Image: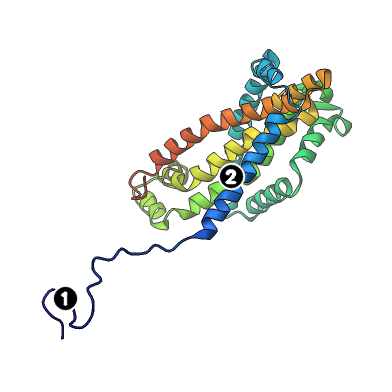
């Protein structure tokens, strides 16, 4: 039987005692280990044979700035090409025509199944297979003049990106309820009109996050184009440290600019995701 105030006769009142918190020693030990490792890494960079004056000197060197501009331009153009190809290939995969489905599946299999650096090298050396490139009877030119490092990098990066983007866009289209397609056809919309005005806008909230990640990844992937002499930021840094032997300093410069560009693009991606997620009930 409980007495007034909720205290059982014969038992002490424990309401005024403080609740003891469970000590999470594992968390503190893990945090200490991480901070110790970070401290040792920072100490190594501070006391290592790194001439930080060279880092500051070449951070805004004209060659480096030109390289970062080339990096951004190539990433934008390759991503645009990859997005267009991705939409086309995704629609081919969803087609009722078995030939289109097979061609789209073969394209995705080929460009996702071979290393990107191999594709860049093949495009850059395509003159060994096709000495001339052009349209018969209209225009032709030597392949070595057409397939410049810029064109080779654009084709290699864009075609490779198209294979990955097609799967992202296909997943976004599939995520839209079939009733939306039926409703669009019921009011007289053709397939392409329904796709442009009904399906794709709704698919964007599914497509945009992975597509944004692909673009940010493309910024860094352009560094592979240095193997075919495209003057992006890493290639520019390499040309400088070949001359002055300041390898680590120039690599730090290139890494800084990659981080700077990604840091600018990440909030932009978040704003776009928030815009296309309006009305979904998950916008933060």
x%, y% of residue 266? Answer: 51, 35
x%, y% of residue 40? Answer: 66, 40
Instruction: Tell me the residue at 57%/28% (across/down).
Output: 260
Location of mark 2 (residue) = 35
Q: Secondary structure at mark 1?
A: loop
Q: Nearer the viewer, residue 274 or 39?
A: 39
Label located before the other in sequence (1 or 2)? 1
Instruction: Classify 10 Å Cα crowding around label 1: few (below 14), some (14-19), many (20 and above).
Output: few
Can the viewer see residue 84 in this picture?
Answer: no
Q: Secondary structure at mark 2?
A: helix
Q: Residue 199 vs residue 112: left or right?
A: left
Query: Disc 1 and disc 2: Cα gap in Å?
Result: 49 Å
Q: Are marks 1 and 2 in contact (CB under 8 Å)?
A: no
Q: Residue furthest bottom?
A: 1
Q: Nearer the viewer, residue 233 or 98?
A: 233
Instruction: Tell me the residue at 49%/50% (across/down).
Output: 173
Location of mark 1 (residue) = 6
Image quarter where the N terminus lies is bottom left
**Tally of marks:** 2
Can the viewer see residue 32 in this picture?
Answer: yes
x%, y% of residue 133? Answer: 80, 27
Q: Quadrant of residue 143?
A: top right
Instruction: Classify 10 Å Cα crowding around label 2: few (below 14), some (14-19), many (20 and above).
Output: few
Q: Nearer the viewer, residue 8 or 69?
A: 8
Q: Quadrant of residue 136?
A: top right
Q: Residue 227 vs residue 41: left or right?
A: right
x%, y% of residue 182? Answer: 39, 55
Q: Nearer the viewer, residue 182 or 35?
A: 35
Image quarter where the C terminus lies is top left
Q: Residue furthest left?
A: 4
């Amino acid at each position: 039987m409980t007495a007034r105030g909720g205290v059982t006769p014969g038992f002490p009142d424990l309401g005024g005692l403080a609740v003891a918190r469970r000590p999470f020693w594992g968390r503190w030990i893990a945090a200490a280990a991480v901070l110790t490792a970070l401290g040792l890494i920072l100490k190594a960079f501070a006391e290592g044979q790194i001439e930080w004056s060279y880092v500051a000197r070449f951070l805004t060197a004209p060659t480096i700035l030109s390289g970062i501009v080339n990096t951004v331009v190539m990433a934008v153009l390759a991503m645009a090409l990859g997005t267009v190809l991705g939409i086309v290939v995704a629609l081919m995969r969803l087609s009722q025509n078995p030939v289109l489905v097979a061609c789209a599946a073969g394209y995705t299999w080929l460009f996702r199944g071979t290393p990107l650096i191999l594709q860049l090298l093949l495009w850059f050396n395509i003159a060994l297979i096709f000495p001339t490139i052009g349209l018969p009877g209209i225009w032709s030119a030597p392949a070595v003049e057409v397939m410049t490092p810029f064109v080779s990098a654009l084709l290699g990066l864009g075609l490779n990106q198209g294979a990955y983007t097609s799967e992202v866009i296909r997943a976004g289209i599939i995520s839209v309820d079939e009733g939306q397609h039926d409703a669009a056809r019921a009011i007289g919309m053709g397939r392409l009109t329904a796709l442009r005005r009904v399906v794709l806008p709704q698919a964007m909230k599914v497509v945009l996050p992975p597509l944004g990640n692909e673009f940010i990844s493309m910024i860094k992937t352009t560094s592979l184009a240095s193997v075919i002499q495209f003057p992006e930021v890493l290639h520019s840094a390499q040309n400088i440290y070949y001359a002055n032997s300041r390898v680590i300093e120039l690599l730090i410069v290139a890494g800084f600019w990659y981080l700077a560009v990604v840091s600018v693009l990440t909030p932009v991606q978040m704003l776009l995701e928030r815009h296309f997620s309006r009305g979904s009930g998950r916008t933060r």
